[in-house]
Amino acid sequence: MRITLDDLTDPAVIALLDGHVAQLRSISPPESSHALDLDGLRAPDVTFWVARDGDEVLGCGALTEIAPGHGEVKSMRTAPTAQRRGVARAVLAEILAEARRRGLSRLSLETGSADFFAPARALYAAHGFAECEPFGTYRPDPHSTFMTLPL
């Protein structure tokens, strides 16, 4: 598996992200769905990575800085065919390494509170993230779990 920066032009990456957004919007009410679409991920303040095995797209993740010293993990997704192969763990490790290289003091994220998101919450907790209050522009939401990690 190799993880590289990506410019979001590969049709396979776009398909993975379209599926990601569609699935999340089917699980969470519109006001509780915070997934970035392609335009959001292409913003200049977003760094986006893709994990691949050869030409196969395994997963992705992004980092954006939401305030000085404070980053946010976005768009973590593992392809259905690549689950339980360590893809999310590897992508998250890349994001954490980049956040530390940038000298960020905190990294936060929003994920769902439904059972569907339990594996994601477990992954983040295993890397030291702890539940926190909403951050940035987020507001309290029963469909969201907010987590943060001091770096």
Image: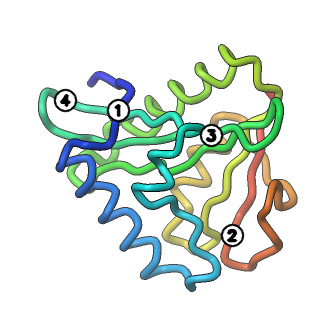
- Discs 3/4, front: 3
Residue occupying the far front of the picture: 44
- Answer with left or right where residue 100 lies relative to residue 140: left
Q: CA distance from mark 4 to mark 1?
A: 14 Å
Dot 3 or dot 1, earlier in sequence: 1
Question: What SS does tag 3 mark?
Answer: strand
Residue depicted at 71% across the width and 37% down the height: 71
Q: Eyeballing the image, is 27 above or below 90?
A: below
Dot 3 or dot 4, earlier in sequence: 4
Q: Eyeballing the image, is 28 above or below 81?
A: below
Residue depicted at 74% across the width and 79% down the height: 142
In the rendered image, residue 134, in percent from the top left (x then y), is placed at: 83, 61
Q: Which residue is mark 1?
A: 6
Dot 2 or dot 4, earlier in sequence: 4
Dot 2 or dot 3, earlier in sequence: 3
In the rendered image, residue 89, in percent from the top left (x then y), is placed at: 47, 34
Q: Which residue is mark 2?
A: 144
Q: CA distance from mark 3 to mark 4?
A: 25 Å
Q: CA distance from mark 3 to mark 1?
A: 14 Å
Q: Are marks 2 and 4 in contact (CB under 8 Å)?
A: no
Question: What SS does tag 1 mark?
Answer: loop
Dot 4 or dot 1, earlier in sequence: 1
Q: Which residue is mark 4?
A: 53
Q: Which residue is mark 3?
A: 64
Q: CA distance from mark 2 to mark 3?
A: 19 Å
